[in-house]
Amino acid sequence: MQAKTWHRCMVTGLGGLLAIPVVATLLYSLSSEWGATLLPDGLTFGWYVQLWHDPRFLTAFGHSLAICLGTLFLSTVVIVPAVFVTFYRFPGLNRLMNVLILMPFAIPPVVSSVGMLQLYADGPLPLIGTPWVLIGCYFTIVLPFIYRALANSLGGMNLRDLMDAAHLLGATTPRAFLSVILPSLKPGLMASLFLSFSFLLGEFVFANMLVGTRYETLQVYLYNVRQTSGHFTSAVVMSYFLFTLALTWLAARLGKIGSQ
Amino acid sequence: MQSTLTTSETLPPARTASRWRPRHASAALALVPFITLLALFCLAPIAWVLIHGIKTDSGIGLEHFGEILSSPFYRQAFGNSLRISLESSALALLITLPGAASLARVPGRLRDIAIAFTNMTSNLAGVPLAFAFIIILGTNGAITLLLRRWGLVDDPQLYSSRGLILIYSYFQIPLGLLLLYPAFSTLDDDWKHAAALLGARPGQYWLRIALPVLSPAVFGTFILLFANAMGAYASAYALTTGNINLVTVRIASLVSGDIFLEPDMAAALSVMLMGLLILVTAVNQWLLKRTNRAS
């Protein structure tokens, strides 16, 4: 009984510790002034109204959404067939693929930015300063997560039998893939896409080093307005935080539906 | 292309190569965009970094590394990065160890909520996290005021390496919890009862039974946290605009600063950072193998 209480207290305490910055930022974004006192002076939605009327913020948010959605679309179109082909035609490549997809995960973004800045500043592929370079980098960021999710689904099903059955019924390989395999990959894929979306929105290093203000994203905007007002930046942080919260919640829900 | 050929060679002879090769070729075609993107945005930049890290004016050499090691400025960057990463990982581990032990022992509903909550807070990282900490622990932050009123701390020195350790620990805690708690749920309660029956005190149980079982997971988690902290850049940059000398801050300022651009030096620093991370991971793997053999 005593141990039980201890474990409960421990978990709740840790949760409380983790909640402090979130709650403080939320309070700060809702307070009209919070200077030399312990608690805010008055509550207001003014900072949010100001933020959601700031054309620069709306543009940056739009840029972020465009890049994230573009990346997720590209990743889906490129990774799904690649995983399927690896599992179905080239199972021998599986080990190599597992190493390859972990490479972007293991290398700090600062390091790959160094090479990227030199390779794509000019020459045949002048990508630096354009959103395209971010879409490419973000592809490598989400690759391990989407690939693993798909590989788990494919590994869990009887791929060869399903395909053979579809072939016997007269379906071509692409047709069989689209109407038999793809539907069962969907829950895992969707969950990984929502999760990827949420941490792509939080990406700062590539966005700041490779593109900066030339195509300002949400995080770069947040960094650039840091001097304006703490309340205002808190409103940015909370807006972003609540948005990603909704995304991860959707991911969790989709994951649950998939596992049922 | 090569894989296409080898696969068709290993096929049963009944299926003729002429029937199979085009099919596999079209299958291999599906891999082309994948490989292209990976090559363009991961392999090529890394190759550039590796090559330019060892390239000097007179060919290939370790000149850049010598320059880095003999420069007090770069040595300080490595020292700071190592110290902040080690201390924040250790601090996070100290907090997450009892946390994960408790998380594995609370009822399912509370655990689900706690895990969802941990996942949620792991979204607060990088620039937003630095700002959140400025709000609570900055010069006029809410907790700063509280601490000052109680006369505990006058200035929490958020904009120093102390502040960085605090912020790094914060983003390491959710990661550590999620990595460690599965290991704790493998601990069997019967072991505890058996140890107690044989006369072991709780402390002895943890020291002699639980920790040896958990040590690969604990050590592996520590390595992951450490590597994560070594490569971190966004929160340090947002908090101090690069005033704290870290390896990642140096690398970034050598390629994207305003004054002196030295991409080759940035490449050499990057190679050293990656080498360090590979070394640490290799040591972890080696220790893991050793403990596996011992048990």
Image (tube, coloured by chain):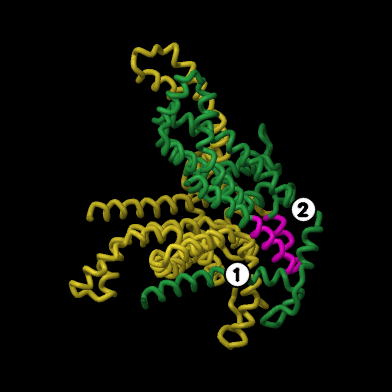
Q: Could you confirm whether marks 1 and 2 are on the same chain?
A: yes
The disc at residue B128 is none
Q: Name the residue under label 2.
A: A58
Instruction: Identify the mark nearer the N-term, 1 or 2.
Output: 1
Identified at 43% across, 62% down, the residue is B108
Rendered colour, chain A: green
Q: Which amino acid does label 1 sit on?
A: Pro
Name the residue nearer the viewer: B186 or B40.
Answer: B186
Identified at 54% across, 68% down, the residue is A18
Quarter of the figure that contains the C terminus of chain B = bottom left
The image shows residue B207 at horizontal and vertical percentages of 28, 70
Q: What residue type is labelled 2?
A: Leu
Rendered colour, chain B: yellow
Q: In which quarter of the image is residue A244?
A: bottom right
Secondary element under disc 1, as helix, strand or loop, is helix
Q: Mark 1 lies on which chain?
A: A
Magenta segment: A219-243
Q: Quadrant of residue B39?
A: top right
Name the residue nearer the viewer: A6 or B282.
Answer: A6
Q: Are marks 1 and 2 in contact (CB under 8 Å)?
A: no
Does the magenta segment cover residue A227?
yes
Q: How many marks?
A: 2
Name the residue nearer the viewer: B251 or B104.
Answer: B104
Mark 2 neighbour class, 10 Å CA radius: few under 14, some 14 to 19, many 20 or more: some
Q: Note whether B269 is above or below A40 in the view shown.
A: above
The image shows residue B72 at horizontal and vertical percentages of 52, 63
Identified at 65% across, 76% down, the residue is B141
* Dominant SS in magenta: helix
**In the picture provided, is A26 more to the left or to the right than A173?**
right
Return the residue found at the far left. Answer: B198
The disc at residue A21 is 1
